[in-house]
Amino acid sequence: MEYDFRKIEKEWQKKWKESNVYKVSNDSPKPKYYVLDMFPYPSGAGLHVGHPLGYIASDIYARYKRLKGFNVLHPMGYDAFGLPAEQYAIDHGIHPAVSTDANIKTFRKQLDNIGFCFDWDREVRTSDPKYYKWTQWIFLQLFNSFYNRSTNKAENISILMVAFEKEGNVKYTMPNAQFSITSFSAAEWRGFDEKTKQDILMQYRLAYCGIGEVNWCEALGTVLANDEVINGVSERGGYPVVKKKLRQWYLRITEYADRLLEGLERVDFSEAMKEMQSNWIGKSSGAEMDFEVKSEKSKVKILRVYTTRPDTIFGVDFMVIAPELDIIHDIESAEQANAVEEYITYVKSRSDRERQAEKKITGVFTGAYAINPFDGREIPIWISEYVLAGYGTGAIMAVPCGDDRDFKFAKHFNIPITNIIGKHFNGEDANPTKDAVLENSGFINGMVMKDAIEVVINKIEELGIGVRKINYRMRDAAFSRQRYWGEPFPIQWKNGTAYSLDEKELPLELPHVESYKPGPDGEGPLANIPEWVAKELETNTMPGYAGSSWYFLRYMDPLNDKTFCDRKVSDYWNQVDLYIGGTEHAVGHLLYSRMWTKALYDLGHIGHDEPYKKLVNQGMITGSSRFVYRVFLTAGGIKKGQVFVSKNHYENLLLLKDLPIEFANYINKYIPGKYTELRENSEVNITPLHVDVNIVDGVLLDIEAFKTKFPEDQVHFILEDEGTYICGSEVEKMSKSKFNTVNPDDLVAKYGADTFRMYEMFLGPVEQSKPWDTKGIEGVHRFLKKLWRLFYDDIKGKVWNEEKATEAEWKVLHRTIK
RNA sequence: GCCCCGGUGGUGGAAUUGGUAGACACGCAGGACUUAAAAUCCUGUGACCCGCAACGGUCGUAACGGUUCAACUCCGUUCCGGGGCACCA
């Protein structure tokens, strides 16, 4: 009785299905355990062997926990809204809903093949109106909330309105300092018209609309979030991204910066992951500090800067303002005005991309001076593109002996450098140390720098010339896309004011469109639909991360049509105990879903404020590409023949002078022309070509299989001495164009799901990235056959019985397990 | 440039309050079975040395140095690989 995996697996999969064995109840006396995979985007390409790695790992763990007596929630679904489906629709005229549905069917079939123990009754699709009804509902929760900084949580906006009626906004600092009205009394509030009131409330909402500089990608026709832009180009497709001012929806994630940071201490994520997130949040503490300005116009009296190093105050040799700041025109001298104007024009001409790619040292003197409040020194005020308008106050105090950028700037423009750290500064490099003893530093002379920081902050607060201040690098997250294939906003505009739709009107369904072309003025395709526009409905749609920010909650209670997830149910399942997925979502999905969880927690909809207890990041499975080497003679050569040379010959060919005689003979066989000619003319073109890895065994090419792809008479081979063809190899990303993808279906068909699953796990640690190599799968398959034979002999059949095991047998068993 | 993680046989990896390095498995080699091959079973398998053999010896955890009776494990320096950040003051 041999190991007939096809029969075995088919039989069991059928049994599982019939008996609903993986159906999970929300009502169980067993302790719960929640194992979650990052749900896939159902792309048209289907699964390759890299995708199931994490699913297999989580599946094994889910089974383990189930056997250990836990009630295990292990669901699967689809992140079905997104750009590629829409792009495909534009190119092929197929509605995204149709192509997405077809893709999901393929995915499901492939997943079933591998024999996962998902509870498919809990499947979710983010593009399903029954699902996005609740995405819209949660959006409205955010829209109708503000962040109360004194209670440190999200609260309903009505609380704010009551407070405004009573006492204005004294107790509630407006998060947006740029807004035209930042403080008002109760009387003033009552005097405002409806539109002004709504505009003010918008400045507080956790989901808000505003005009902002956004990352606009012309090629994709949409706005992208910061984490979707890599080095000035779009993450998807690598298209140029420019800054553009547009009306946008945002999530006020900055209000959660501290809690997102603090929460990291309570979760089990890898250090690398935590670091990525905390870098992204980028908390820094220091002080804002005012400098008196001395300028011709004397319009502006104060320049406010942000610094993390108040201890270096006596080393300030110049100030720098970001070129975008309006204050520049109030302080520039008549003499410098032209130069300043010229410089601002130059900066405007530079794209973000250029600014990041070539970090040139540029800048111009404004003609104005700042006064150091501690020693009265006059400090020249410059403007330069290296200071960013969006961070801190957009102005800095420059300390060239301690900061590399300031140092280079000072050197470039010949600004004298004050040394406040003695021998720690060598005059050739800045030294950012905090451990030096201060010199030339007035009242903090002789102090160690890190101790002086506190002393100086206290002093400036005492003198009333500044405040202690914490800054974050993280910005509010752009939350709208000028696209079709996403959740519509449940928002209706009336006289330029956004109002939420009533809950009863949800879901606001995505209407059918004929064209996916963008609407006018940078608006999305929904702006082309007259009925939509007539109702003044929002024409933007939500970004891809909207649906994925809360899907782990919907799995708990997927069919509920009264609420997104019953509170009793979410209290039972609570946090995801084990979450498995790739690192690419470190600062996107993971941060957003953590924020949504915290907001839902604040508003009392769920009972926990961190969604994932433990996160494991599976490594990427890279492809191992194989190459054949094609030789063409470009002059007087063969007309239609192609010669494929094996690897060793290829390497020799690259070193023409080392070409062995035997090889010259080969060439004579297939290529007209003498070896010497070849050498002198070098009119030979050798091209490595990707060859389908599925017809290569290790590095040995299946020559017969290869020949089927080319007409026999046109293909010649120059083989190794043993008569084999050795391919070249290289590790690359797995992709169809590189012919290095391996389809799990083929492997499952050949070896069975158990072999395939075991082999994926055998490849190495889940967290590690590693190249796929089918070579070792035979060994795992043999191992499983051996295991099978422990129970069934090929001839004798069943070799086990139900007798009680002897002590010796128990020993063997446990030794084996160990 | 800065930050984080890692480096043990041909391969995946065992072994750390410092105490027999390489468990287990894959692969590979030799043998058995077979007309032959596959499958299967048995044996061997870090490198080197001595010996008919049993036994034994030397080296060995990226490299070098240090602490220790004792180092894969602790410390220092360097090299290599992977990942992240990159004008955030």
Image (cartoon, coloured by chain):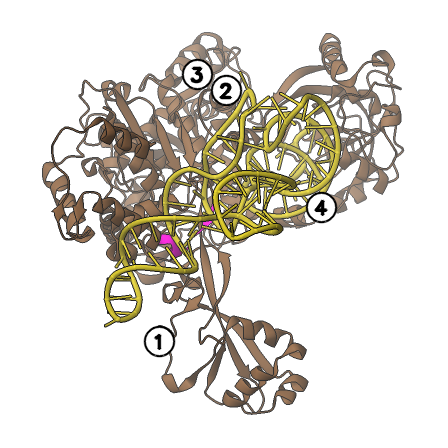
Chain colours: A brown, B yellow
Q: Earlier in the sequence, mark 2 or mark 1?
A: 2
Please name the amino acid that badge 2 sits on.
Answer: Glu
> CA separation, marks 2 and 3?
14 Å
Residue A319, by quadrant, is top right
> CA separation, marks 2 and 1?
61 Å
Please name the amino acid that badge 3 sits on.
Answer: Lys
Which residue is drawn at the image coordinates 39% and 57% (left, top)?
A775
Disc 2 versus disc 3: nearer the observer: 2
Residue A695 in the image: x percent, y percent? 37, 67
Residue A541 in the image: x percent, y percent? 37, 41
Q: Earlier in the sequence, mark 4 or mark 1?
A: 4
> CA separation, marks 1 and 3?
68 Å
Magenta segment boundaries in residue numbering: A769-777
The reply to whether callout 1 and callout 3 are in contact (CB within 8 Å) is no
Q: Earlier in the sequence, mark 4 or mark 3?
A: 3
Please name the amino acid that badge 1 sits on.
Answer: Glu
**Residue at label 3?**
A153
> CA separation, marks 4 and 3?
40 Å
Which residue is drawn at the image coordinates 81% and 17% (left, top)?
A373
Of A208 and A352, which appears nearest the observer? Answer: A352
In the image, taking residue A684 as reference, residue A644 lies left or right, namely left
Of A269 and A474, which appears nearest the observer? Answer: A269
**Residue at label 1?**
A704
Q: Is residue A663 above or below residue A548?
A: below
Residue A516 in the image: x percent, y percent? 35, 54
